[in-house]
Image (cartoon, rainbow, N blue to C red):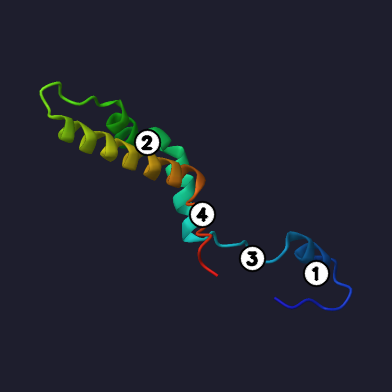
């Protein structure tokens, strides 16, 4: 809407800043994930709480622990972001 010069409604409209900003999809998703953090983290934490079966061979236990380390790395990457690749130029 256009206002005549000197119209006080023009100054008021300028203070309000125009149309409201539309949030980005990533911002909306971040809010939803933060509000449901316990639900999102549960699979990671459950996997880290598991223990290998005592009947497993040493090789199976090693694979299990490697899997747990992989889960922990994924959780940390989600929480703090993936570290920058310093080999790229």
CA gap between label 1 and label 4 equals: 32 Å
Identify the element where label 2 is drawn.
helix
CA gap between label 2 and label 1 equals: 49 Å
Residue at the location (80% across, 69% down)? 10
Q: Nearer the viewer, residue 59 or 29?
A: 59
Residue at the location (50% across, 52% down)? 83
Q: Position of residue 13 (x, y in %)?
A: 76, 65
Circle number at residue 19: 3
**Disc 2 target residue:** 41
Q: Nearer the viewer, residue 63 or 18?
A: 63
Q: Are discs 1 and 4 less than 8 Å apart at CB?
A: no
CA gap between label 3 and label 1 equals: 14 Å
For marks 4 and 2, the one nearer the N-term is: 4
The residue positioned farthest toward the left in the image shown = 55
**Disc 4 target residue:** 27
**Disc 1 target residue:** 10
The residue positioned farthest toward the front in the image shown = 58
Q: Are discs 3 and 1 less than 8 Å apart at CB?
A: no
For marks 3 and 2, the one nearer the N-term is: 3
Residue at the location (89% across, 73% down)? 6
Q: Describe residue 53's horizontal placement relative to residue 34 as left or right.
A: left
Identify the image quadrant of residue 7.
bottom right
Answer few, some or many: residues within 10 Å of disc 3's Cα (few below 14, many 20 plus, some between 14 and 19): few
For marks 2 and 1, the one nearer the N-term is: 1
Question: Which numbered mark, 3 or 2, is in the foreground of this view?
Answer: 2
Q: Are discs 4 and 2 less than 8 Å apart at CB?
A: no
Q: Position of residue 47 (x, y in %)?
A: 28, 33
Answer few, some or many: residues within 10 Å of disc 1's Cα (few below 14, many 20 plus, some between 14 and 19): some
Q: Nearer the viewer, residue 88 or 39?
A: 88
């Amino acid at each position: 809407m256009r206002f005549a010069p000197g119209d006080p409604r023009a100054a008021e409209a300028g203070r309000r800043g125009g149309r409201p900003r539309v949030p980005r999809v990533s911002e909306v998703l971040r809010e939803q994930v933060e509000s449901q953090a316990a639900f999102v983290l549960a699979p990671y934490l459950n996997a880290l709480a598991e223990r290998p079966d005592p009947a497993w061979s040493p090789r199976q236990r090693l694979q299990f622990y490697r899997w747990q380390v992989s889960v922990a790395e994924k959780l940390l990457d989600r929480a703090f972001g993936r570290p920058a690749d310093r080999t790229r130029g």
